Image: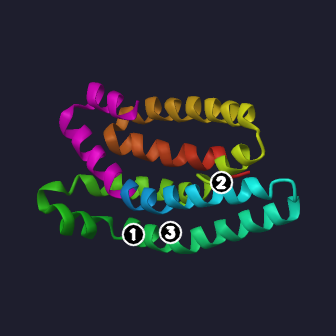
Amino acid sequence: LDNILIGKYSGAIELGYYDRAYKLLLFPLQNITQPLTRVMVPLLSRIHEDKVRFRDLYVRTNWMLAAVTMPGIAALTLTSEQVVALLFGPRWTAVAPIFAWLGIASLMQSVSSTTGWIFICQGKTKAMFQWGAYSSLTTVASFVVGLHWGAVGVAAAYAISGYVLRVP
């Protein structure tokens, strides 16, 4: 939906910048979290009745995931201008602030994406659906608010809404 809104209200160029930034950040995250999910869901499902082992494995895995992903994401975020210039060239500098905001969002996402494991492994798919619906509505609302500032605003609003949803 973010792509549709940016394309409609900010135009194809802004959408291109946003898409480039999003894909650049999403690629490494997906290559870590998706294979990990294929391993962890069956493991956690087998031990879901042993709450202590389940919690221990889940927490240790999240700490390791954070240790692997967060330093890289932070470095890419802090050097977004240089990263974009190096990978795409000087004509793509408008991607850098979008990439930086999406990087801020990804710091939390790399670990929070694993909460689905808990719902699935414990058979709480209804609660997972409800949480997904609530977080989707909040995220869409943030896109609408951010549209006023174009693709950068959408990325910033997305990052902020992610923290509002997940930080107690």
Task: Name which residue lies at 41% across and 73% down.
Answer: 75
Question: Which region shows up in magenta?
Answer: 1-25
For badge 3, the amino acid type reads Thr
For badge 2, the amino acid type reads Val
Foreground pick, 31 / 163: 31
Above or below 81: residue 37: above
Q: Nearer the viewer, mark 1 or mark 2?
A: 2
Crowding around mark 1 (Cα neighbors within 10 Å: few <14, some 14 to 19, many 20+) is: some
Task: Name which residue lies at 40% across and 62% down.
Answer: 28
Residue with the mark numbered 3: 69
Q: x, y percentage for residue 118?
A: 72, 50
Instruction: Check if residue 41 falls in the magenta segment.
Output: no
Q: Which comes sooner in the sequence, label 1 or label 2?
A: 2
Determine the residue located farthest toward the top in the rendered image. 8
Instruction: Check if residue 11 falls in the magenta segment.
Output: yes
Q: Is residue 19 left or right of residue 136?
A: left
Above or below 11: residue 27: below
Label 3 element class: helix
